[in-house]
Image (spheres, grey):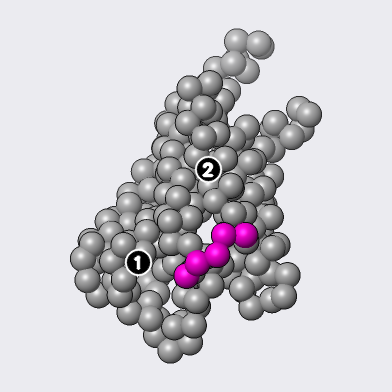
Amino acid sequence: MDTMRRNKYAILLAVVLASAIIQSFAHRLVFGPLASDVLLTATAILVLPVVFDHRNHRLVAVLAAVTAVAADWAHYVVPGDLHNRWLAVIHNGALLLLMGYATVVILRNIFRQQEVRGDDVLGAVCGYLLAAGAWANLHVLTEIFVPGSYSMGAGFDGELSTWQGIIASFYYVSLGTLSSVGSGDIAPVRAPATVFVVLEAVFGQFYLAVVVAQLVGARMAQGPQRNATGKNKN
């Protein structure tokens, strides 16, 4: 149990990466969508004990996670165009809240951290990927409420015909925007998508600059403290 606590972010990172990889091509496989939803559910559940240690924070996160998971699995039984538009709104809205809130809590913990361990660095990576997930859900909601907000390149038009295809496409957009690598195949063509993409790019640069500076500063501060402790012992 102690080992799991010390490596909690490593475990969460492994699940998040597995979920992102499976989502990228799950909609093309027979059992891919099911595997994708299982990993998404695992991510939502695992985020709760790993990130949220305060009761009030966890209450909000639990409500968001339960809502997201319930809406995700409900699309298998609820008929309708694109598996019911409002289920998609509820699902992506709840995930936006959960992942966005998790990112804020991780950032708060980083700035309060006095000692930097390897798992804390992985926690910063988790925060980055969860932030990408939050922005991805915002892009999905934008496309739902303002259809045609994004121009789809060749090969991506068919991706929007399935629940998992939509998620995979906009997670690709989000990661490209957040890292400033870009996603030339899918581009925003009207507001508010154009504004959200710019804001996400700014957030991505801010995240990297501030978090790296904080971790490096905390790490450098540990050196003098350890030397002073060693001298006192001698």
Q: Secondary structure at mark 2?
A: helix
Q: Position of residue 230 (x, y in %)?
A: 62, 18
* 145 left or right, relative to 78: left
Query: In this picture, is 161 found above or below 113?
Result: below
* 49 left or right, relative to 89: right
Query: In this picture, is 233 found above or below 169?
Result: above
Q: Which mark is residue 67?
A: 2
Q: Secondary structure at mark 1?
A: helix
The magenta segment is 77-81
* 78 left or right, relative to 166: right
Q: Position of residue 220 (x, y in %)?
A: 48, 34
- Viewer-proximal residue, 33 or 226? 33
Q: Earlier in the sequence, mark 1 or mark 2?
A: 2
- Viewer-proximal residue, 132 or 157? 157
- Viewer-proximal residue, 213 or 231? 213
As for residue 80 lying within the magenta part, the answer is yes
In the rendered image, the quadrant that contains the N terminus is top right
